[in-house]
Each structure stands twice: as C-alpha cells, then as structure tokens.
Image (tube, rainbow, N blue to C red):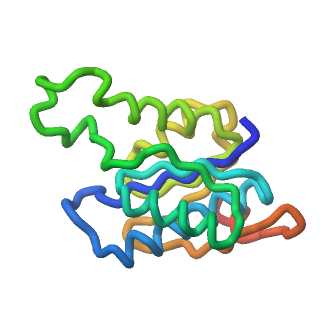
Amino acid sequence: GEYSVAHYRAFYARANRNPKTIADFAINAVNCASELRPGGPVYFASDSVYALSTARDYAKEHNYKIVTIENHEPLHLDKAGNWSERTPSDFYSIFVDLYLMGMGQCLSYGQGGFGKFGLLLGYNASCSNRHTWNIHLMSCNWTSADEKSTSALSRR
C-alpha cells in the first residue's frame, strides 16, 4: 500500500498504563512511521482506545494523515476472557489490523510480536524501525515529504 504503519501495544505484559505514557508512546510511534515514508499517510493500530484517540487528535491538531479504525478496546487473542464463548466476529479487528499492517509499505513497531508479525506478512520487511525497545522510547519526529530524516535509517 501507499502508506506506512505504526503499531503500539500499550498493554504488553501489563493490565494498565499511565495515560501520559500511552499518549507519548502513541505519538512517537506515528512519528517513527512517518520517518519511514515521509509525507505519506500512517495507519495506526493499538490495543488502547486512548492511544487511538490520541493519534486521531494529533492528526487533527497538525493536519497529518493518520488513520485508525477502532473505537473500543480491541480484544487480544492471548488475553480475551471467555474466548470460547465469543463469536469469530468479536475478533475481526485483530485480523483487519494484521492485514493492514502487512499491506503497508513500511512499519514501525514496538513491544510484543504482533507488529513484527504484520511486518513479516508484508512484502517489504526491510522497511521498518522500532519505536520502543523494551520500555525505552526511540525518539522520532514527524517527517513531512519535503524533509529528510536520518534517525529512522540508523534503527533499521
């Protein structure tokens, strides 16, 4: 696709996280994705409705092209309670995110394996960066089409 992707798993190995941390990491994730494909749209996937909302607000505030699809906390295949009683459609958003991650031109990912899995399913696994390493933020800035960023290249 003609877009980059940022995946941020806010609740990796934890039940909750400070909202400011979620917002900071979400914004950084989309900034890192923009470094991979300057000026292009970014699809943002997350397991946190607050992170998704933050990315949408960030896009509106700066007139950036950032797209999300969830409006509620998405289920996790590994954490969903009563998973055997749920219908397959309850899990659709997981597969939509995975499909869109695989179809993106480049992908920025962090903790957990879901973002990396989406990258490996795609056709260009060499166009990627990590926006989070363990709990450490790899600082990125939004990069427009007329700017060149070398920070993303150093993390590939």
Q: Quadrant of the N terminus?
A: top right
Q: Position of residue 75 (x, y in %)?
A: 28, 40
Residue furthest to the top in view is 88
Q: Is residue 80 above or below residue 143?
A: above
Residue furthest to the right in view is 146
Residue under the point 35% across and 60% down: 10
Query: In which quadrant of the rendered view does residue 48 lie?
Result: bottom left
- The residue nearer to you, when weighing 34 against 86, is 86
Residue under the point 80% across and 65% down: 144
Q: Position of residue 99 (x, y in %)?
A: 53, 30
**Count of residue discs:** 0
Residue under the point 46% across and 69% down: 25
Q: Position of residue 110 (x, y in %)?
A: 46, 57
Judge left or right: residue 77 versus residue 65.
left
Residue under the point 37% across and 56% down: 49
Q: Is residue 3 above or below residue 147?
A: above
